[in-house]
Amino acid sequence: MMESIIISVFVIGYLAITLEHNLKIDKLIPALAMMAVCWALVALNVDQFPTWFDSAKHALVDNFSSLVAEDKVHILEETLLHHLGKTAEILVFLLGAMTIVEIIDYFDGFSTIKSFIKTKSKRRILWIFSFLAFILSAIIDNLTATIVLISILQKIIHKREDRIWFAGLIIVAANAGGAWSPIGDVTTTMLWIGKKVTAGKLIEYLLIPSLLCMIVPSLIASFLPAFKGNIDTDETTDEEKPKSKYSAIMLYLGLGAIVFVPIFKTVTHLPPYVGMMLSLAVVATFAEIYSRTKFSLTDFNSAESDSNAHHSPVHHSLSKIEMPSILFFLGILMAVAALESLGILFNFATTLKETVPMMGTELHGEGVSDLVVLLLGIGSAVIDNVPLVAASLGMFSQPIDDELWHFIAFSAGTGGSMLIIGSAAGVVAMGMEKIDFFWYLKKISWLAMIGFLVGSFAFMIMRSLF
C-alpha cells in the first residue's frame, strides 16, 4: 500500500534527523530528502490514493477516487503550491528576524545586556539569565535568544563545567518564553500565521503558565550545589569594537522593529512576513547610515577600497544567517504537508480522538483530550516540535483562538526542553557548548519536566476560569 511506503519514508527520515549526532549527518539532509521522496511518491502514484485533503477548506475532497487523472494532477499541483506558499511565509518571516538580530550583533548591540550583569553570585546570575531568556525569547525568538545569552555567558563564566549548567536552564527558560509570544518560537509563529491563534489571546492564555514553567525549574535549580557560591573572577576584558558606540541604539531599534510586527499585522491584516520585511528595511537603513560613519572619504581611494565593499552590515548579516535551519524547516514542513495531503493526518487525528481517554473532553469543541496534547509535548522532546505542530494543523479543525490551539502552543513549545534534541534552542546550545545528550538527560531533563507539568496544570486551571 503506497500510504504505508510514504509513512515509512517519513519515519526513516525522522530517525535520521534524531540520530544526527550519531550518523554525523546534518539534519537538513534527511529532511530535504524525505520531503522530495514523499512528494515524488505522491506524484507518481496519485491515481492510487482514495482520499485527498484540501488544506484550504480543511476537509477531504469529495469523490476524489472517481476523478480523472488530469483533475487529480491539477489538484496535486494546487495543493503543493498552497503548502509551499504557507511554508514560505514562515521561512521569509524567520529570515527577516534572523537578519535583524545579526545586524544588532554586527554593532555589538548585545554587549549592552552584558554590561547590566555586575554580580558574581551564581544564584543571582542564574535568575538574571533565566529572566533574560524568558523575555528575550518572546521578543527575538528562543533560538536567537539562546545564541545571544550563551555568547554573553561565555564572556562571564569561563569554566565550562559551570557554564553548561546555566546553558541547560537557559534552554528551559527560552522555550518557556517563546511559548507565549507569537514571534517567540517557530511553532507559535506557525500557529499565528496559520490563523489558529491571535497575539492577544496567546499572551492572555499562556503568560502565567509559561512564567511558572520558567520559575519553578530555576527555583529548584537555585538550591542545587552547581549554583552555590560565586563564579571565578577574571579581569580580562574584551577589546572594545570601534562600532560599539551605536550598540545600544541598534539593540533598541532592532528589538523595537521585531515587536512592531504583531502590531502591523493587527492594523493591516497582512501576513506577518510583510511587517517583518518592513522592519528589516528600517533597521537595515539605519545600519547602513551608521556603518558609513566609520569610514573616511579617503578610505574609498585607498588600497583598502575592496575590503570596504564587504563592510555593508546587511550583506555581512545575511552571510551569517543559519541557512541550514531554514532549509531544515522547509524539508520538515513540506514532508508533513505530503502526509496531510493524503488525508493520513486527518484519519490519524480521528483515530486518536476516538481511542485516547477523554480527559477534559467537555472543554474542547470536538472532544480532543488533554492527554493527547500532553503526549504531543512529550513527543516534541523525542523528535521535534515543528513537525508535530505542523501535523496538528492538519489533524484538528477547531476555530481560531480555541483553547486547544493555545494548549498545543504551550505543550509543543515547552515540552521540547525535556531532551536537548527536542527544541531548536537545545540543539544550538548543544552545538555551542558541546553538551552531552546523556548529561542533559540526567541533570536538566527532570527540571524541564517539572516545569512542563506545572505549566500544563496551570493552563488547565486558568482555562476553566475564562
Image (cartoon, rainbow, N blue to C red):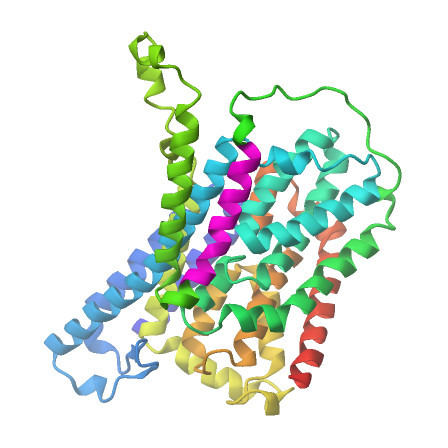
Query: What stretch of residues is rendered in magenta?
Result: 247-264
Q: Is residue 325 left or right of residue 207?
A: left
Q: In this orientation, does residue 27 appear?
A: no
Q: Is residue 211 left or right of residue 225?
A: left
Q: Is residue 60 in the magenta section?
A: no
Q: Specify the farthest residue to the bottom.
A: 362
| Whole-percent x, y for residue 50 in the image | 26, 83
Across the whole image, how many numbered discs are drawn on residues?
Answer: 0
Q: Is residue 61 left or right of residue 98?
A: left
Q: In this orientation, does residue 220 appear?
A: yes
Relative vertical location of residue 210 with respect to residue 23 in this rendering, above or below: below
Relative vertical location of residue 143 with respect to residue 363 in this rendering, above or below: above
Relative vertical location of residue 454 with respect to residue 227 in this rendering, above or below: below
| Whole-percent x, y for residue 419 in the image | 64, 55
Which residue lies at the image location 41% right of the left edge and 54% below the top edge? Answer: 329
Which residue lies at the image location 31% right of the left edge and 14% below the top edge? Answer: 300
Which residue lies at the image location 74% right of the left edge and 32% below the top edge? Answer: 157
Q: Main secondary structure of the magenta part?
A: helix
Q: Which picture quadrant has residue 228?
A: top right
Residue closest to the eye, 22 or 432: 432
Tell me the quadrant of the picture where the N terminus can be found: bottom left
| Whole-percent x, y for residue 165 in the image | 74, 43
Q: Which picture quadrant has residue 202?
A: bottom right
Q: Is residue 249 in the magenta section?
A: yes
